[in-house]
Image: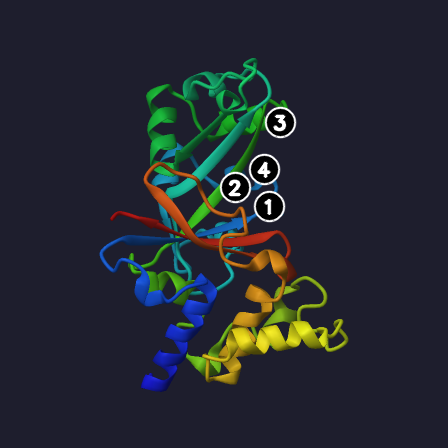
Amino acid sequence: MTNSWEQDLTAAFSVLLGRPVEGFDPEADYALYHINGAVDDRWLWEALADAESLRCTCRIADNRPALLRICLALDWSLDLARSVFEFDFTGESAFLWVLGARPDSNLVAEACRTATGEELATVLTRHGLGVADILSALDDGMVTAGVSFRVITDGTLQDALLTAIRGKRGPDRLRPGPDEAVALSLAPGLFDSEREELSPEAAAERDRLLAPVGDPRLRAHIWSPYLDRPWDRPGISSGGPDRPGTTRVAAWDLAYFGEIRLAVTQTGP
């Protein structure tokens, strides 16, 4: 791609991060997480064959189309082993005890447990439990479950951000486009020309914010759906896993897609 496109990407990433991209440690490891709050608690576990499936990588070429339907891009792959699973227990179950949760405690943190897919698979296997036990606890109302899916990237901040904006196919193929929006049945209003217009003050702020990005296609793409709602500013969204040694460097609520959030985290120096 042209140097101009690369320069525009650097400018766009700085806007998305809220500070110059050059200021981030190039030696750190960066990860992209995808959270879909509209997914039913049971959906993921019904799509998994067994506990060992939690150590798998899901690619579009694999026979795991159910899991990949949540992705915003067809070229995404999901790393279940490093995805983060969060459980909030409300009652007793065999699954609860192996994770050491205490729903009877007055401390909210003791009723919740967080584990990567790798950690969860190890615990379930060690205790002779499987996906069916998680489904049983869900059916009994003993637990609620959520997951931050880790999208596979090369560990650099550049690749995490480029994957997040679905821009790997270049400026002419920025995703989603209007035709794709219809095909994917996205939330109404995403490409609606009758959407409420910005106030002059808001439009001026938008133009100021995006001025460093030269390509009009990229400016439009990162404005909607990433930045055109006040809660989409970096550091505002609550999206992304909370893990020891990990810092969330950016997060966005993609409201027009439904209950979807993206988060980029940093691990390391």
* Quarter of the picture holding the N terminus: bottom left
Secondary element at image label 4: helix
Contact check, label 3 and label 4, Cβ < 8 Å: no
Coordinates of residue 126 in the picture (x, y in percent): 33, 21
| Viewer-closest of 263 and 133 | 263
User: Mark 1 — residue?
Assistant: 39
- Of badges 2 and 1, nearer the viewer stands 1
Secondary element at image label 2: helix
Contact check, label 2 and label 4, Cβ < 8 Å: yes
Contact check, label 2 and label 3, Cβ < 8 Å: no
| Horizontal relation, residue 90 to residue 19: left or right | right
User: Mark 3 — residue?
Assistant: 139
Coordinates of residue 107 in the picture (x, y in percent): 53, 19
**What mark, if any, has residue 44 been given in the picture?**
2
Contact check, label 1 and label 3, Cβ < 8 Å: no
Contact check, label 2 and label 1, Cβ < 8 Å: yes
Q: How many marks?
A: 4
| Horizontal relation, residue 88 to residue 7: left or right | right
Q: 10 Å neighbourhood of mark 3: few (<14), some, or many (≥20)?
A: few
Contact check, label 4 and label 1, Cβ < 8 Å: yes
Q: What's under tag 1, amino acid-wise?
A: Val
- Of badges 1 and 3, nearer the viewer stands 1
